[in-house]
Amino acid sequence: MNLLFLTSQVPYPPRQGGALRAWGIISALACHHTVTILSFHDAAGVPPLPPDRGPISLDVVPEPPPRPFSRRLRDLLLGRQPDMALRLESPLFRRRLGERLADQPFDVVHIEGIEMAPFLGVLEQARPRPLIIFDDFNCEFLLQKRAFLTDLRHPIRWHGALYSLVQWRRLRRYEAEICRRADSVIAVSEADAQALHSLVPGLRLTVVPNGVDVSAYDPQTVPAPGMGPHALVFTGKMDFRPNVGAVLWFAAEILPRIREQVPDVRFWVVGQRPHRRLEVLRGNPAITLTGYVEDTRPYIAGATVYVAPLRIGGGTRLKLLEAMAMERAVVATSLGAEGYEVQDGRELLLADDGEAFAAAVVSLLRDPARRMTIGRAARRFVERHYDWSVLAPRVEALYTPLSWRSL
């Protein structure tokens, strides 16, 4: 079939959540189908796609500039659309998409993430109209609901709670509308699927969890320089609110408890664009904020223990799969591991309060044999359930005639 993917960023090389997911699906499907990617790109330029992944072509449009604060404030106070529907508004992208649809018929178009949903109207007007699949990376209204409830407990974050309340209400309406208009919807977890079904009863929905190309994660990767024998690692976009909250909570409530028992422990926060709220951590000699790195795998390889202290979020966390594929021992909150059918104590350790989380990390720091056993079990778990060779057929099954609705 002839497939078109609409992505908010060029998904290659796959360095973070959305790109990792999109590239995993695209590269697996390109073995059997012709794939075109229409994507935004930033000023850094467009990397060449690998030639060994099948027939994949790339068309790019410059990413629109960020909306000024005054415009965002006006939209917040007077508008009805959620921020995610406005961030990538682009007449140029809309025009380019219309041209591509006019030039050649596509059997299927994937909308990769809710930020690309504003271009759904162009797809609906195409003749012949393609099958439209909406891949909902996160159940976004649920994420904002959780952020609201978390921030509401802390008066210093009430401004954030107010923002999340507004976005939660708007996203409920917007996300439901997008799901109704798409021919099929993909959710990344059963929890997200249940939340979306609560919005749109009877929704045609398939769960395709996040995955990785396990062969790309070598447990013997040489660690990044200077990491030391007691390195704790967290990876992710560091301007993403759930990640920021996770790191601040870990630094304030968990790391001091660990250092009481393992004084030379060091916490590595690996990810681009650290938010200004993280600046308070730079003076702590036990914490390193790397900012952007070309490849996170050497840092994951250097992790004595990988930590995922997430308390806000939705969907599933690709960062866990990456760490598990590299045979790292992981400690996560129940929310951080949500969507994965892991067993506490077998593929990773789970802990939901600061004291328990610190105790779990310390137990692993002191027990190399247990770290090795958990790490190997984690990689086997990812190989069996979350390699893209296992997951891609679920996506491909949506292309069968039985999945088409009457148009």
Image (cartoon, helix red, strand yellow):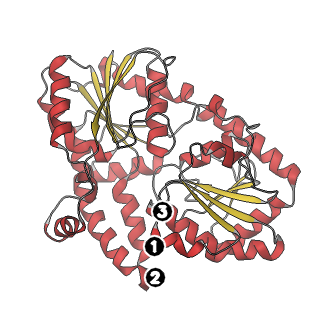
Res 256 → quadrant? bottom right
Q: Nearer the viewer, residue 370 or 62?
A: 62
Percent x, y for residue 170?
23, 61
Amino acid found under the numbered disc labelled 3: Pro
Residue sitting at the far front: 44
Cα–Cα gap, marks 1 and 3: 10 Å
Helix, strand or loop for disc 3: helix
Up-down relation of residue 324 to residue 400 (above or below)? below
Q: Considering only order in the chain, which callout, 3 or 1, is on the residue closer to the N terminus?
A: 1
The residue where tag 1 is placed is 150
Cα–Cα gap, marks 2 and 1: 8 Å
Percent x, y for residue 193?
40, 46
- Tell whether 146 sits left or right of 90: right
Cα–Cα gap, marks 2 and 3: 15 Å
- Which residue is at 68% across, 44% downward? 298
Res 97 → quadrant? top left
Up-down relation of residue 83 to residue 405 (above or below)? below
Up-down relation of residue 73 to residue 302 (above or below)? below
Q: Which of 256 and 291 is in front in this view?
A: 291
- Tell whether 119 sits left or right of 265: left
Percent x, y for residue 342?
65, 47
Amino acid found under the numbered disc labelled 2: His
* Picture disc at residue 242: 3
* Picture disc at residue 88: none
Q: Nearer the viewer, residue 188 or 401?
A: 188
Disc 2: CA contacts within 10 A as few (<14), some (14-19) or many (>=20): few
Disc 3: CA contacts within 10 A as few (<14), some (14-19) or many (>=20): many
